[in-house]
Amino acid sequence: MRDLVVKLMSGPEVPERASQAFSVAATALAAGGTVSLWLAGDAVRLAQPGEAEAVTLAHATPLAELRDAVLLDGQLTVCTQCARRRDLTAEDFLPGVRVAGSATFVAEVLAPDSQALSY
């Protein structure tokens, strides 16, 4: 099984896109995959306490539940520059959230057994 790297750039204002990215990541984890979910742009807010809990989408697993699954069994990463542009630091995010930059993202995407998706 290949590693899966998912990048989400839409935040709470686009709940369907956010739900899709988190759902794919959580489903891949449940199937036994290795998953890294990257939050960029306004999506970084979804790694803050209370933000995913405020997102609702009919007929979808609650976003906070999907986020927690990724935090438990995968890697949830916030883009360094995106966080800085919003005056956010590592302390503003949930425990277990990694803050990293483009070099780390590129290394994950270019790994030999990696598959990347973007939402």
Image (tube, helix red, strand yellow):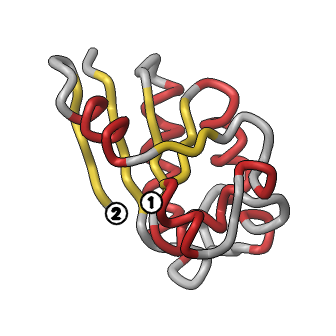
Q: Residue at x 75, y 60 (%)?
A: 48
Tell which circle, 2 or 1, labels the residue nearer the N-terminal end: 1
Residue 42, horizontal then vertical, whole percent = 53, 74
Relative horizontal placement of residue 53, taking residue 86 as reference (left or right)? right
**In the rendering, which numbered label is found on residue 66?**
none
| Amino acid under disc 1 | Gln
Q: Nearer the viewer, residue 57 or 44?
A: 44
Residue 105 placement: quadrant: top left
Quarter of the image with the C terminus in it: bottom left
Q: Nearer the viewer, residue 107 or 69?
A: 107
**In the rendering, which numbered label is found on residue 20?**
1
Q: Secondary structure at mark 2?
A: loop
Q: Gap between marks 2 and 1, in whole Å?
A: 8 Å
- Residue denoted by label 2: 119
In the image, residue 92 above or below residue 116: below
- Label 2 neighbourhood size at 10 Å, few (<14), some (14-19), many (20+)? some
| Amino acid under disc 2 | Tyr
Residue 36, horizontal then vertical, whole percent = 45, 35
Q: Nearer the viewer, residue 80 or 48?
A: 80
- Label 1 neighbourhood size at 10 Å, few (<14), some (14-19), many (20+)? some
Residue found at the very far right of the displayed protein: 50
Relative horizontal placement of residue 83, taking residue 9 as reference (left or right)? right
Residue 21, horizontal then vertical, whole percent = 44, 55
Q: Residue at x 25, y 20 (%)?
A: 2
